[in-house]
Amino acid sequence: MDFGRDVCGDLGQAEAREWLVTNGLGGYASGTVAGLLTRRYHGLLVAALKPPVGRTLLVAKLDETAESGGRVFSLYTNRWRDGSISLHGYRHLERFRLEDTVPVWTYALADDLLEKRVWMEPGANTTYVRFELPRGSGPVAMSIKALVNYRDHHGSTRGNGWQMRVTAEDRGLSVVAYDGAVPFHLRSDRGRWETAHDWHWGFDLAEERARGLEDHEDHLHVGTIQGTVEEGKSLTVVLSIDPGASLDGAKALERRTRHQHALLGAFAKAQPALTKHVSAWVEQTMFAADQFIVDRPSPKDPNGQSVIAGYHWFGDWGRDTMIALPGLTLTTGRPAIASRILKTYAAFVDRGMVPNRFPDAGET
């Protein structure tokens, strides 16, 4: 997938194209090429708090502003409930592409090029957002506003009177939405954070309106990071429920890349005839297949696994799992995963019947 200015600079086309990355737990990050929120399911960190369900929107988006050569470039785009748009960050978007499963945005800042990558740590409710300067005339100053939430990914939020607890910590900040909520953390490898507590009202959600559902919601600005990006020095923002998540963006991206290469290696062993001249679309299909396989630990089997029936809103369904299992696991050279999935469902067989659904609250 690779789009140039003809798509990226046209808001109608850029907001109609969506991206998704997952973590193997049921959690995900998702959005549009334009950076505009159009679904309640869009967000940079939708964490599976009871894998593979309990999916909860924690971080909705980052609104980035860059300063280069004395000029200020707003890189974000928001549409509000009244239909107005601010700001028009997509106009600076030169290119959008996928590097295996990692979405990459390339912004033109006059003569400079700024790249942003988003990916999730395999097996963790952690999202990385990394900024690099492949071409630059000097340092680029970044100001990045973090907008958060805390709700079931099927829901919507009204911020009236909701006071979250935002606390400065080493290299970032932590957020506790209410007593008993799971804390989450926004940190970075470089830069300086300033905490805030400012509700942004009325984000428009066009795709929810098309579905006949509530079409606007509020997100909370909890902090802003000020930092610089220059050639050879990236800036990585880490969004996680793990306070000890690594801040090393380069090593985190290497782990993601190794995971993807392992998928291709397993497929090559299982299908040697098909991999002699493997095309890009076959590789993308392999990567997409992996995103549906998730952990489903239970007291009976802490290593249990299952298959998500679809993103964004489906859970793991027995019927869909059994239909998809041969293609997702055996064709791709991962019989051990097939075995774990079958054992997971076999543990809940009742009078010869395989369960079709697990409750989304995580009870079975």
Image (cartoon, rainbow, N blue to C red):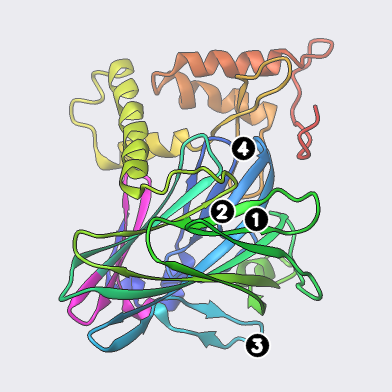
What distance separates the C-alpha of mark 3 from that of mark 1?
Answer: 24 Å
What distance separates the C-alpha of mark 4 from that of mark 2?
Answer: 20 Å
Q: Earlier in the sequence, mark 3 or mark 4?
A: 3
Given this view, does label 3 or label 4 mark the residue nearer the observer?
A: 3
Kindly identify the amino acid type of the residue bearing the numbered disc 3: Asp
Question: Which SS does the magenta portion mostly show?
Answer: strand
Residue picked out by circle 3: 82
Q: For residue 299, what is the image quadrant? A: top right
Q: Is residue 116 left or right of residue 41?
A: left
Residue picked out by circle 2: 45
Q: Which residues are magenta?
A: 90-113
Q: Position of residue 29 (x, y in %)?
A: 52, 52
What distance separates the C-alpha of mark 3 from that of mark 4?
Answer: 35 Å
Given this view, does label 3 or label 1 mark the residue nearer the observer?
A: 1
Any mark on residue 309, and which? Answer: 4
Q: Is residue 102 left or right of residue 82?
A: left
Q: Residues within 10 Å of mark 3 (few under 14, many from 20)?
A: few
Residue at figure coordinates x 65%, y 35% from the top left: 51
Kindly identify the amino acid type of the residue bearing the numbered disc 1: Leu
Q: Quadrant of the C terminus?
A: top right
Residue picked out by circle 1: 57
Label 3 with label 4: CB-CB less than 8 Å? no
Q: Is residue 119 magenta?
A: no
